[in-house]
Amino acid sequence: MGVVASRLGPALLAAVLAVVGGIGIAEGAIWGIERWTADERELIASLRLNQLAPAPADPSNRYERLPAAAELGRRLFNDVRFSRNQAVACASCHAPDKQFQDGLPLGKGMGTGSRRAMPIMGAAHSPWLFWDGRKDSLWSQALGPLEDAVEHGGNRARYAHVMQAHYRADYEALFGPLPDLARLPQDAGPLGDGAERAAWAAMAPAAREQVSRVFANMGKAIAAYERGLSYGPSRFDRYAQAVVANDPSAQQVLSAQELKGLRLFIGKGQCITCHSGPLLSDQHFHNTGVPPLDRSRPDRGRAAATAKVQRDEFNCLGPFSDANPQQCQELRFMVTDDPKLEAAFKTPSLRNVALRPPYMHAGQFASLDEVVAHYAKSPAAVAGVSELASAGAGHAERKPIRLSAQEISDLAVFLGALSGPVVEGKP
């Protein structure tokens, strides 16, 4: 066969094999390529990064596509002056050299959080931000940690003063004149400590609105920067493209074990049910029976977040949004009363997943093998799930998937083929 193969072109050889072996070309029987059915080939093709549409426009942020806004946002993202202790920046938990996350089970800023930091590449494609979706835009998401006592721990008045002292020209070139801050307190905000809240309450309503608008514009600049952060193509993308093109070189891109893992990913393992599309995420929220860190106080996830996003002054319908109400469809028609939202968390992208352990919303699993093994178990067999349900935190929606130890390993190895570069591009 080796002699014959050397004398026949790939197309002719495929035809010969189709006739001699009764193998249909439409079923993926191309010499040197794993044999995929037409449906499998379509699934694989749908996961290619080059099929990702441009991120949708955010009508609530008119500045998101301006290069000057992105450059200002990049500087704000890396500036530790926007924290109470002058030591925490956005980049502290979303480090460029660590996949724009921190590699810790739980995020650490001024204190230790209750969930792990999510990577932000491709976040502009999602209508909901954070593990629970409590923010409805990138700019609103950027503001949350700045006022959180455990993260940056700062306050709006302090941030406005920092903007005036260090970024005035850049800010005013984009957003117009900064308000007169001379008579305003150095520290004041609605979410600060007692003294800061009292100082905020003592400010005139117009002054509070002006400071809050400076704060909102900071978020819009940071969002413009984050919009340009994306994933680069992986070995899987090269393989998938070769499969689509019937290129025999595809067989050299992934190992035999990775190919077995891919077959499990789109088939028996059911991974593609939630990890679909070019970003390998359905952008929805699911309760998959991940054991809580504290069984006495289970994390309610999405169920507790819908009220937060509805009352957020920085949401799409709020006074600092650039959208009109008709453009806020996601927020206006958000599902709030589905029991499945209890203990449900956002499906993370699996791109570059092998480069950013630990896993799950609170770093419950240290390795990808542990993650896959979790999904191979019956929910009732997972430690803590029965306690979770009895505590009123919902029921796991997943069904047990019967995978052998070898298949678990194959799937975990395949996930390593999803790693590619991180791209910092234009907004």
Image (tube, rainbow, N blue to C red):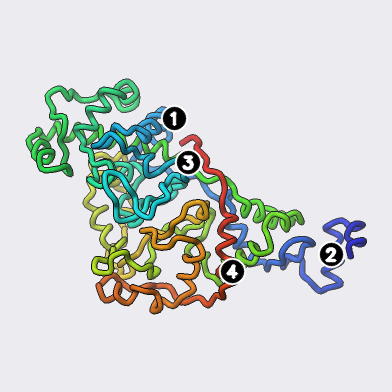
Front one among 41 and 195: 195
- Sort mark 4 into few (<14), some (14-19) or many (20+) by Cα contacts within 10 Å: many
The kind of residue on which mark 1 rests is Pro
Q: Is residue 423 left or right of residue 1?
A: left
Quick one: label 3 or label 4, which is nearer the N terminus? Answer: 3
The kind of residue on which mark 4 rests is Leu
Nearest to the eye among marks 3 and 1: give it: 3
The mark total stands at 4
Q: Is residue 64 visible?
A: yes
Q: Identify the residue at horizontal 31%, vertical 24% (top origin).
A: 167
Residue denoted by label 1? 67
Check whether the beta carbons of the residues at disc 4 and disc 2 lie within 8 A of each other. Answer: no
Quick one: label 2 or label 1, which is nearer the N terminus? Answer: 2
SS state under label 1: helix
Q: Is residue 197 left or right of residue 392?
A: left
Residue denoted by label 3? 97
- Sort mark 2 into few (<14), some (14-19) or many (20+) by Cα contacts within 10 Å: some
Residue denoted by label 2? 15
Instruction: Give me the C-alpha separation between circle 3 and circle 2.
Output: 48 Å
Q: Position of residue 409 (x, y in %)?
A: 57, 67
Instruction: Give me the C-alpha separation between circle 3 and circle 4.
Output: 31 Å
SS state under label 4: helix
Q: Identify the residue at horizontal 20%, vertical 37% (top origin).
A: 155
Q: Identify the residue at horizontal 53%, vertical 57% (top origin).
A: 277
- Sort mark 1 into few (<14), some (14-19) or many (20+) by Cα contacts within 10 Å: some
Residue denoted by label 4? 264
The kind of residue on which mark 2 rests is Ala
Q: Position of residue 410 (x, y in %)?
A: 60, 66
The kind of residue on which mark 3 rests is Asp
